Image (cartoon, helix red, strand yellow):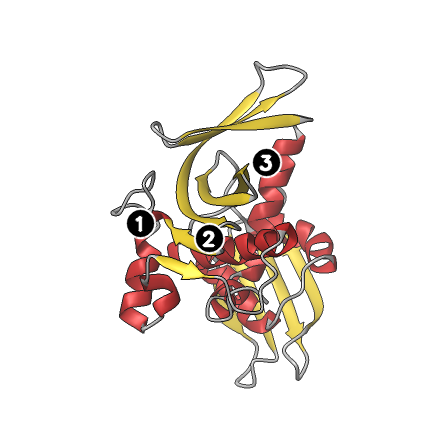
Amino acid sequence: MTFAALQPLADRAALFTALRQDSLVTALEDLGENRWDADMAAGTLTFTSNADPSRRLTTRAHLIATIAPGPRSLLWAWAHPQGDPDGVAGQLRDYGTAHGIAELSQSELPFPDDASGDSEWITAAAHTVGGVAVELTGRAPYYSAPVGGGTSAVFLLDAPIPPLTVSAAAIALPRILAGTVLADARTAVWDAARLAGWNLTWADEAFSGATVADESGSAAFRFDEQARITNIESSLHPQS
């Protein structure tokens, strides 16, 4: 556990987040071994192939937060010297103010007393922050970048990757679910549909199943009493 008050928001978006992160990984794999460079003035993050520098992926990058081991704190981008007080990160602040979540509305968030603050903990915290940012802004994927001294910067990316369709999700889900722990899979499916813009229909008043659909096809989920996914059946349309 990193920031307990933030975790439920990240959990709600966990499935959508994992699917969008998978799309980013696929795009970066096409570059092979690569490096990243940030241009804070231009607001971009560029990934460049090591083997062929002419091959690159450039994306609009919105700084969300930095997480630093020195002060043992998270600093939200709207309060960061290189951040934008009226930028995308401000949506998290405004949500925190509206819903009484101090961890979002105060500029700097100290690490919990029991936090190790080591690189592994900071990496986990960055993933939590990334998930929260996806949930509250609808933007994805995110990228956690080491910026020196053990500090990580979390960016939301307007990346040139295809929109998330039901068809693409259904193909990726077996792999995604094998490596992703969903605190509440039923809620995560509902939220993925909301964030992706799919239609969702519940199977019954007990919410024992749900079908999501868009122009690419449909996928039917079944859940057990603990809201875990027990089965997925998809019907996908041929892609031209």
Residue drawn where x is 33% and y is 66% of the image: 96
Tag 1 or tag 3, which sits nearer the N-term? Answer: 1
Residue drawn where x is 51% and y is 67% of the image: 112
Dots 2, 3 in contact, CB < 8 A: no
Dots 1, 2 in contact, CB < 8 A: no
Tag 2 or tag 1, which sits nearer the N-term? Answer: 2
Number of residues whose C-alpha sits closer than 10 Å to that of mark 2, classed few (under 14), some (14–19) or many (20 or more): few
Answer whether residue 197 is visible to the viewer in this image.
Answer: no
Q: Residue 202: horizontal and vertical position, in percent?
A: 53, 75
Residue drawn where x is 40% and y is 52% of the image: 75
* Residue 227, quarter of the rendered image: bottom right
165 relative position to 173: left or right: left
> Could you say which disc has been placed on residue 71 in the image?
2
> Could you say which disc has been placed on residue 79 in the image?
1
223 relative position to 96: left or right: right
80 relative position to 28: left or right: left
Q: Residue 148: horizontal and vertical position, in percent?
A: 53, 37
What amino acid is found at the position of numbered circle 1 in the picture? Ala
Q: Nearer the viewer, mark 3 or mark 1?
A: 1
Q: Residue 165: horizontal and vertical position, in percent?
A: 54, 49
What amino acid is found at the position of numbered circle 2 in the picture? Pro
Residue at mark 3: 240
Q: CA distance from mark 1 to mark 2?
A: 15 Å
Q: Nearer the viewer, mark 2 or mark 3?
A: 2
Q: Residue 104: horizontal and vertical position, in percent?
A: 37, 62
Tag 3 or tag 2, which sits nearer the N-term? Answer: 2
What amino acid is found at the position of numbered circle 3 in the picture? Ser
